Image (cartoon, grey):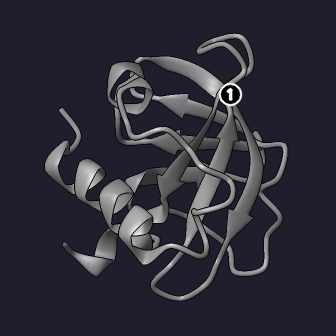
Amino acid sequence: MSESIWSYGPSSGRQEGANLTGYKVEATDGHIGKVDKHSEDVGSSYLVVDTGVWIFGKHVLLPAGTIASVDHQEEKVYVARTKDQIKDAPEFDKDKHTADPVYRDQIGDYYTQHPHI
């Protein structure tokens, strides 16, 4: 698995130290929720997105490499994946996402194998 899926791309517009919590999250085909939590850890950056009613209150884990761009003025994060790609990702497990490297690999592999369409 490519470690770059867990790093922000150079053209993402991410500003180091910026708090993305509460930003709206947009897939390539529409709104999916808002940022509930984020990490800037080198090689392990991610967003946890609260999808609200879109997929029944579920949270999803998005590796930083799925982020196409961040618009700090509009407080929006644009993800280079479709709603269906995000909905079909392995279920978010709040207890495993930082502690279980196998789970992290599952998520990373899913998004690496399902690139932007």
Examine the rendering and report whether any part of residue 11 can be seen: no
Tell me the amino acid under the disc marked 1. Answer: Gly
Q: What element carries label 1?
A: strand
Q: Name the residue under label 1.
A: 33
Which sits in the foreground, 7 or 98?
98
Which sits in the foreground, 29 or 94?
94
Query: Residue at 39% across / 53% down in the picture?
Result: 66
Note whether 13 is above or below 56 in the view shown. Answer: below
Q: Residue 99 sits in which quadrant?
A: bottom right
Residue at the bottom extreme of this rendering? 42
Left or right of 92 on screen, residue 17: right
Q: Residue 57 sits in which quadrant?
A: top right
Note whether 62 is above or below 51 in the view shown. Answer: below
Which sits in the foreground, 64 or 106?
106
- Quadrant occupied by the C terminus: top left
Query: Residue at 84% across / 43% down in the picture?
Result: 22
Residue 63 pos. (x, y %): 46, 60
Residue 77 pos. (x, y %): 61, 44
Residue 25 pos. (x, y %): 63, 35
